[in-house]
């Protein structure tokens, strides 16, 4: 069983030195367990947090641990009567080729609904994050302007399309002309703005003539700075992620802007609300049903960025933190 371990904690951007490959014998499942051959591994920005020792909403990995991650696998040996050989399941098995898992932790997937890799993306955690965060906190109304950052990515692409389904105007922010064209031409966003353009803030302002009612925050940094002045009174800001900050090692230079931020939260009655998707676990059944229907009807489209082979995972993950992925980043590990 080939595995990728956390070799050391990154200082700033992760490097290949932070990862270590090793090979161990494939283990035997115990009672109530199954042996999985991993088919797909999800790569997600939160993994950067797990590599650090800093306190967060989940415990960090220890050096020497297998890198964490959601996976889709095939049952190749079962000692849980609920699973048979050949079943395809969602598990949290990490960066490796084979894994032992407790049957109770698995969700069986139906390959006839959609390609099983989507259980890691649009029909999985990232799609659910978009759904719960936008609808519960963002609460978009018909005619309102919803802006989403990292809009071509796994979460952002679903946010914009759900906003449109709810009758709002969707403005996507993404890095580069190709991603912006994809938002407009493939996903039906009303406007797409390139955050790498020198006049990005002006373009965003022009794209939001009525201001911003909902801003779905995935990024932070210069994107947030351009959005903030445009927020309308009573705007809702689901704070989902701050990927532009994940590699930071020190606070940014410059004056303390927190008092000015708080003044605006007060005077514009802003609702800035952070969340971790698991908080909304009760909404998962509704999500699976609604999202599957939206995909079947073509109202939600998705793009996967599939890289080949476990060994490609570290490089692909490093690219995710710099916008090199285009769509939900998934590693194909087995057939
Ligand atoms: P994406 O598929 O959107 O990939 C990440 C994207 O972020 C990149 O493609 C890039 O897009 C953008 N990006 C990366 N670095 C920067 C940077 N320095 N400045 C600006 N943009 C950058 O990832 P996900 O959809 O999986 O995740 C999106 C966000 O949602 C992340 O912040 C993640 O942590 C968060 N998240 C939060 C959850 C929660 O429960 N709160 C659950 C799941 C995800 P581009 O090229 O367009 O700039």
Image: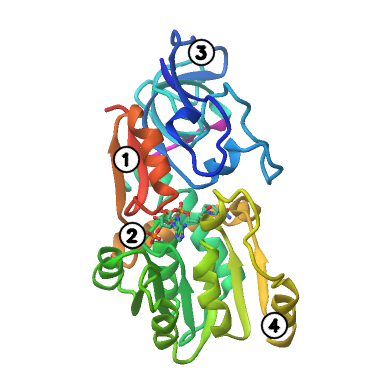
Q: Identify the residue at image location x=62%, y=56%.
A: 280
The reply to whether dot 1 and dot 4 touch (C-beta < 8 Å) is: no
Q: Secondary structure at mark 2?
A: helix
Q: Which mark is residue 286?
A: none
> Callout 1: 10 Å neighbours few (<14), some, many (20+)?
some
Whether residue 308 appears in this view of the structure is: yes
Tag 2 residue: 295
| Mark 2 and mark 1: Cα distance apart in space | 14 Å
Front position among marks 1 and 4? 4
Q: Which mark is residue 264?
A: 4
- Image position of 177 with respect to 145: above or below: above
The reply to whether dot 2 and dot 1 touch (C-beta < 8 Å) is: no
3 or 2: tag closer to the N-terminus: 3
> Callout 2: 10 Å neighbours few (<14), some, many (20+)?
some
State left or right for residue 124 relative to residue 102.
left
Name of the residue lying farthest toward the front: 254
| Mark 2 and mark 4: Cα distance apart in space | 39 Å
| Mark 3 and mark 2: Cα distance apart in space | 36 Å
2 or 1: tag closer to the N-terminus: 1
């Amino acid at each position: 069983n080939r595995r990728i371990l956390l070799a050391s904690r990154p200082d700033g951007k992760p490097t290949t030195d932070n990862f270590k490959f090793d090979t161990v014998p494939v283990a035997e499942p115990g009672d109530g367990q199954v042996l999985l051959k991993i088919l797909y591994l999800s790569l997600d920005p939160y993994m950067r947090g797990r590599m650090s020792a800093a306190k967060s909403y989940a415990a960090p990995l220890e050096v020497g641990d297998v890198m964490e991650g959601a996976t889709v696998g095939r049952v190749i040996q079962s000692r849980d009567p609920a699973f048979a050989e050949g079943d395809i399941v969602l598990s949290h098995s990490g960066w490796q080729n084979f894994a032992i898992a407790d049957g109770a932790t698995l969700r069986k997937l139906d390959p006839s609904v959609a390609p099983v890799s989507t259980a890691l993306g649009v029909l999985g955690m990232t799609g659910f994050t978009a759904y719960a965060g936008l609808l519960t906190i963002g609460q978009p109304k018909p005619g309102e302007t919803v802006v989403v950052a990292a809009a071509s990515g796994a979460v952002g692409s679903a946010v914009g399309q759900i906003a449109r389904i709810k009758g709002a105007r969707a403005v996507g922010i993404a890095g580069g002309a190709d991603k912006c064209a994809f938002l407009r031409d493939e996903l039906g966003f009303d406007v797409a703005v390139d955050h790498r353009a020198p006049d990005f803030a002006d373009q965003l302002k022009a794209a939001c003539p009525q201001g911003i009612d909902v801003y779905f925050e995935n990024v932070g940094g210069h994107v947030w700075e351009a959005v903030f002045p445009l927020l309308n009174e009573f705007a809702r800001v689901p704070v989902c992620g701050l990927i532009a900050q994940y590699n930071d090692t020190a606070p940014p230079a410059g004056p303390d802007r927190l008092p000015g931020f708080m003044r605006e939260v007060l005077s514009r009655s802003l609702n800035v609300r952070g969340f971790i998707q698991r908080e909304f676990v009760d909404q998962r059944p509704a999500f699976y049903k609604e999202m599957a229907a939206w995909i079947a009807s073509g109202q939600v489209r998705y793009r996967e960025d599939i890289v080949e082979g476990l060994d490609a995972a570290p490089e692909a993950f490093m690219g995710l933190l710099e916008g090199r992925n285009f769509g939900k980043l998934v590693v194909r590990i087995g057939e």
